[in-house]
Image: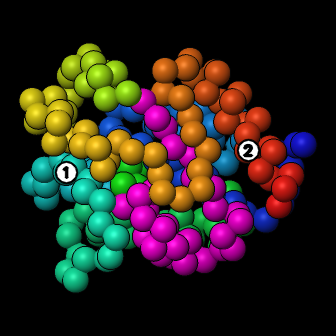
């Protein structure tokens, strides 16, 4: 199957905790497929930081908040940009923690609705990296946004945040090399595409 041939626009949602390797994987995948890459941090962090925002820890929630938080607004920017690209026929790789969306089927259904394409054309890829390795990577990169998380990894990497998604997904082993991750994912993705 030629994964780069012209067809209806699709979205691959790449999720996982910070420092799990999801951004590197998402960029490699977008390059391989020749799809648009949309990263929550790239789309929203410059403005967020300019406004004096602090880096947040995603906490999964089943229901939408009664009043939108800054994090909700960041995701709205990402969803709206993704929907515009899909409406133009551009397939996209979208990367963010997506903690609520990968945990709760109702939140995943809301994501599908916001993207405005049929559910079979939205795919979830979960970067599964052991918590100890995540903390090790954060210490290595030494980013300011990671300081509080490294000090209190139990809060940041709670069981509810690190558990496998509660919706259908393709698991990516965070300990494999980037090339191995890509090869394994593309193999699984091709099988799923053939079923649809």
Asked if residue 111 is positioned above or below residue 17 in the image, the reply reads below
Q: Is residue 107 magenta?
A: yes
Q: Which residues are magenta?
A: 100-129
Residue under numbered circle 2:
189
Instruction: Tell me if 187 is positioned left or right of 112 in this view.
Output: right
Residue under numbered circle 1:
56
Q: From the viewer's perspective, is the residue at label 1 or at label 2 nearer?
A: 2
Instruction: Tell me if 40 is positioned left or right of 185 in this view.
Output: left
Q: Secondary structure at mark 2?
A: helix
Give how far across and how far down residue 185 sits, in percent: 67, 36
Q: Residue at x 59, y 50 (%)?
A: 169
Q: Tell which circle, 1 or 2, labels the residue nearer the N-terminal end.
A: 1
Q: Secondary structure at mark 1?
A: loop
| Nearest the eye: 78 or 133 | 133
**The residue positioned farthest toward the bottom in the image shown:** 66
Give how far across and how far down residue 171 sits, in percent: 57, 39
Instruction: Tell me if 65 is positioned left or right of 186 in this view.
Output: left
């Amino acid at each position: 199957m030629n994964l780069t041939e012209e067809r209806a626009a699709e979205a691959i949602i790449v999720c996982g905790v910070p420092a799990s390797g999801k951004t590197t994987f998402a960029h490699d995948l977008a390059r391989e497929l020749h799809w648009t890459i949309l990263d929550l941090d790239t789309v929203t962090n410059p403005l967020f930081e300019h406004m004096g925002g602090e880096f947040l820890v995603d906490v999964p929630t089943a229901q939408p908040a009664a009043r939108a938080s800054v994090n909700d607004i960041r995701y709205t920017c990402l969803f709206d940009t993704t929907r515009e690209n899909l409406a133009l026929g551009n397939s996209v790789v979208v990367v963010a923690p997506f903690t609520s969306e990968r945990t709760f089927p109702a939140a995943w259904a809301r994501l599908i609705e916001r993207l405005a394409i049929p559910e079979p054309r939205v795919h979830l890829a979960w970067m599964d990296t052991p918590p100890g390795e995540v903390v090790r990577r954060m210490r290595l990169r030494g980013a300011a946004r990671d300081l509080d998380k490294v000090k209190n990894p139990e809060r940041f990497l709670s069981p509810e945040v690190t558990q496998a998604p509660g919706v259908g997904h393709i698991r990516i082993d965070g300990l494999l090399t980037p090339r191995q991750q890509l090869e394994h994912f593309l193999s699984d993705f091709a099988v799923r595409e053939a079923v649809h």
